[in-house]
Amino acid sequence: MAKAIDIFSGCGGVSCGLSRAGFDVKVAVELDKSAAETYSNYEPLKNVDVIIKDVCEVTGEEILKKAGIQEGELYLFAGCPPCQNFSMQNPKNRQKSEKERKKLLFEFLRLIEEIHPPFILMENVPGITTKFNSRILNSFIRRLENKKGRKDEKYLVLKDVLNAADYGVPQTRKRFVLHAVRMDVYEELKACGLEFSLPKPTHSNKKDSELPKWVTAKEAIDDLPRLGVGKEYKGTGKKKVYNHKCANLSEDNLKKMKYIRAHGGSRSCLPDSMVLDCHKKKKEDGSTFTGHNDVYGIMDPNKPAPTMTGGCLCYSKGRYGHYSQNRAISIREAARFQTFPDDFVFSNSLTKAALQIGNAVPVKLVEASAEEFLKDINIIQEKRKIDKQSRT
């Protein structure tokens, strides 16, 4: 079984996707103890050696030793450096220096340059590709590509912004995805007649596509038991459901939800008496500052869910109202939208669970990338085996 290493692992979205595709995740690095605890509580990941410390204090030698990886072994080095510094949704990033914004991405690069892994997977927010962040991303990629004269140190890099909904995720969530292969390994791939590539879509919203349609919010969660506002459903035996718990709602927000549900699903329908003062402020041009339009919204059951964020369990932070029940979505529903399996158990703290789920990469999107890498690794390993036999 091919080995994998997961840096900035969070609660385990990447490792979960890798393991479901067939990788043996050997080591993870995560600073947050609560996220690391959630990671280790998932049965398929319980034997992963989780290094709980700042990635800046971790060395490549330490990682390889803990992973038990030998020289010449084919493995995947995966990492999703925290995306907050690259997000265009955070206006504070404009005040941060380039050095501050690129720090963790370049710690990831430092580890790559220390161990020279055969394969690399990186994911981040689409904002990393914007003009504002282009110097940082381009510098990172140039360092990967331009080790002159050393095929065992430079990489072929493929990158794109992908929509998770195209990979069976019931959520419209765009992610920057990077696949890289070390050039000496790439030569082996070419000798096998293989094309190194990004994952190919498995679903589509195009009418003329032969692929299955995008998975909708209703298809993803409609089988879960009904839930009251601020309640938790546990069940027993075969009916047990983990983390099916939702936030409470104030009377004002419950009234808003009922009104919005009856008038199209968006808060733009609210009468003036129900609109918050912050949504009535005027801009310099005299127009009304409305803020994020999805706030206080109701999900459309016939479309994928909106992007899960660190506030995904809070009705006032996005279009996180359940499509048919007067409440915000539950922890388990948010996890379903991120395609975590139902036996992946999160903290029952709504705040902790929302952050862990919102910060994770959708499991099925990772799985799609993992399958591409695993296909390449398996074929190269088979060719190496045949070549070795022919020499003996």
Image (spheres, grey):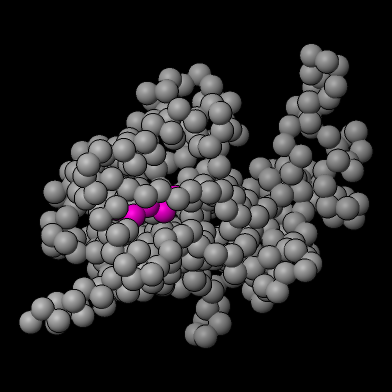
Residue situated in front as seen by the camera: 114 or 184: 184
Quadrant, the N terminus: bottom left
Q: Position of residue 377 (x, y in %)?
A: 31, 69
- Residue 325 visible in this rendered orientation of the protein: no
Please state if 131 lies on the left or on the right of 279 as rendered. Answer: left
* Screen quadrant of the C terminus: bottom left
Q: Main secondary structure of the magenta part?
A: strand
Residue 331 percent across, percent down from the top left: 56, 60
Residue with the most extreme left position: 392
Q: Is residue 383 visible?
A: yes
- Per the rendered image, the range of residues in magenta is 178-182
Quick one: 358 or 304, which is closer to the camera?
Answer: 304
Image position of 144 with respect to 379: above or below: above
Instruction: Please report the residue visible at 85 percent of the width from the left and 22 percent of the height from the top.
Output: 287
Please give left or right for residue 277 compared with residue 180 in the image: right
List x then y, in percent, for residue 180: 37, 52
Is residue 349 toward the left or the right of residue 157 in the image?
right
Residue situated in front as seen by the camera: 154 or 338: 154
| Residue appearing at x 52%, y 85% in the figure | 238
